Amino acid sequence: MRLFDFILPCQIQRMISSWRRRRAGHCAGKEQPWGENRGMELTIPGHFRCPISLDLMKDPVTFSTGITYDRESIETWLDAGNQTCPITNQELKSLEPIPNHAIRKMIQDWCVENRSHGIERIPTPRIPVSSAQVSELLRKITMASESEDEAGCLKLVTKLKALAKESDRNKRCIVANTTGSVLSAAFDTFSKVSFDRNATVLEEILSTLALLFPLDREAKSFLQSSASLHCMAWFLKGADLSGRKNSVLALKDVLSSDESRVESFSKIEGALEALVKLIKEPICRTATKASLMVIYHMVSCSFPNEAIIDRFVDMGLVSLLLELLVDNEISMCEKAEGVLDGICSSERGREKAYNHALTIPVLVKKILRVSDLATQFSVSILWKLICKNEKREEASVVVVEALQVGAFQKLLLLLQVGCADRTKEKATELLKLLNLHRDRLECVESTDFKDLKRRF
């Protein structure tokens, strides 16, 4: 027989009552202790419970319908796209909740009265920032920047950043009030005056903008100005790690939408070297990835970029990329391969890749081992190294090496499991060329693919 067959109905009832007591205590913040009130069941007053979660409210707020909810519960409801009161189904005139201080004070008093039951007093919550408060802060920031009041603007931006860090709710409110555009305009204004003199406020603005990415088109237009780009390059070349990180994050967001700005930035003295330095001497993974993305836009855009690629090649970027590919996580591998694919679009880039011992083994290994995107980049790079230079002696050497490390089998498998049309065309062309050289050496046996992890 089961254990529950031996439990009497009265025992079951006592178990349920005990569970209810513990549940009431837990909802108030702490489980009830055993003591002289052990036999009493504590009931939370109905008007202290949130109509949505049915738990004791910790931050009661009211709307135009007069119904009070716990802030977390009603904001979850609103974030889902609802604009009506969950209880009355009336349309809310304003989505800004009003703190119900009276109910909160009553709940806190009730907690104090029942502390013998183990109930802890709910702390007074910090009221989230409102749209009106954000708008006023932004108005003052605009005035301070227009009057070139560095100290005043710094104080205001610091306050805004603190509010954004305080909670996700604050951050959403700040983003929704076109904060990015105001801060970007202020950054552009102070950049035109002096980098050195306004370095502190400029860095604080960049640091705050880093919390608000992605920026809208208007905000990006201010950061794409010549003064702003030169200022971010100045930070990128500096010794301050925070400034370098925030500037490359901003550049990644800004340069992704305008090729003309990419070309302008690439002409700034020392900018390319600073980007490569972030890869060679990494600050953090986030900064390294951002640097790779900025470089990717430079080597993959449509304007004539042979000279830019040659400069990156001379800085030793090919070796750095291959070292990143040896053993790294998916996102880093995808970005490194994307940059290498762009570099191999030039003759100098392909020549450098030809002469590196890691190139072919690493690229073949990454096929079907990392992600669909990494596989596409690997096939594209191999195609550029082999098929775009069929008549060169180096290409013949690359073909033999590719066969030795199992490229033929990997590409056959890729066609079997499926891939994008453009990748399929390149893989087919590679197979035809590799097949012509298979008689030059005994091809390795097919690899055991039973443990192959594919993201299909």
Image (tube, rainbow, N blue to C red):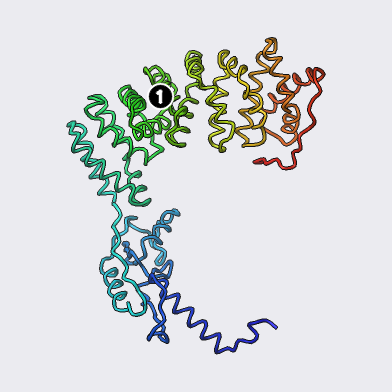
Question: Where does residue 151 sit, x and y in percent of width and height?
Answer: 18, 36
Name which residue type carries label 1.
Ala
In this rendering, does residue 256 appear at all?
Answer: no
Identify which residue is drawn at 41% across, 38% down.
Answer: 214
Tell me the quarter of the image containing the N terminus. bottom right
- Left or right of 355? Residue 82 is left
Residue placed most toward the observer, 12 or 273 = 273
Question: Where does residue 319 sit, x and y in percent of width and height?
Answer: 55, 23
Q: In terms of image quadrants, where is residue 262?
A: top left
Establish if 456 lies above or below 146. below
- For label 1, the SS is helix
Label 1 environment density (alpha carbons within 10 Å; few <14, some 14–19, many ≥20): many
Question: Where does residue 142 sit, x and y in percent of width and height?
Answer: 23, 36
Q: In terms of image quadrants, where is residue 74?
A: bottom left
- Left or right of 72? Residue 360 is right
Q: In terms of image quadrants, where is residue 261?
A: top left
Identify which residue is drawn at 80% across, 20% down.
Answer: 441
Question: Where does residue 341 sit, x and y in percent of width and height?
Answer: 57, 23
Identify which residue is drawn at 27% across, 74% down.
Answer: 109
- Left or right of 388? Residue 95 is left
In this rendering, does residue 358 appear at all?
Answer: yes
**Residue on which disc 1 sits:** 274
How many numbered discs sit on the rendered protein? 1
Residue placed most toward the observer, 381 or 106 = 381
Establish if 15 lies above or below 383. below
Tell me the quarter of the image containing the C terminus. top right
